[in-house]
Image (tube, rainbow, N blue to C red):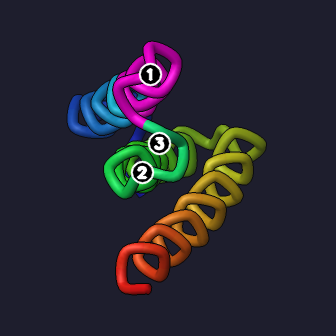
Amino acid sequence: MPGVDDLWVHIIGWVGGIIVVIAYLLNTTGKLSAKDFWYQFLNLIGSIALIINTYLVGAYPSAAVNVIWVIIAVGGLIKSKKSHTS
């Protein structure tokens, strides 16, 4: 397991956080609906990056929250796909 001083661990965390915030900003400003594929996809990718970061730095509560966030995003993606194929 890498130490918390490994630069790539921090970069992954920052990128993940930025992606999640961008998704939230786009949703709040009405540019993406919470039901939109891209909103769920951005949340999924951002949360996966945050899981990696928080797990590797030992922030297990944050890692757990992001695992739940990923589960929600996957559910949203499945629902989004079903509504587009119907």
Magenta residues, as a range?
Answer: 20-32
Q: Which residue is mark 2?
A: 36
Alpha carbon separation for disc pair 1 and 2: 11 Å
Q: Residues within 10 Å of mark 3 (few under 14, many from 20)?
A: many
Q: Residue at x 55, y 73 (%)?
A: 79
**Front one among 14 and 18:** 18
> Mark 2 and 3 residues: CB-CB less than 8 Å, in contact?
no
Give the image location of residue 77, x and y in percent: 46, 68
Question: 8 or 83, which lies in front?
Answer: 83
Which three-letter amino acid code belongs to the residue tagged 3?
A: Leu
Residue marked by disc 3 = 50
Residue at the far right in the pictured view = 61
- Disc 1: which residue: 30
In which quarter of the view is residue 4 placed? Answer: top left
Three-letter residue code for mark 2: Asp
Position of residue 56 measured from the top left corner of the image (x, y, whole percent): 49, 48
Inter-mark Cα distance, 3 to 1:
25 Å
The secondary structure that most of the magenta stretch takes on is: helix
Who comes first in sequence, dot 2 or dot 3?
A: 2
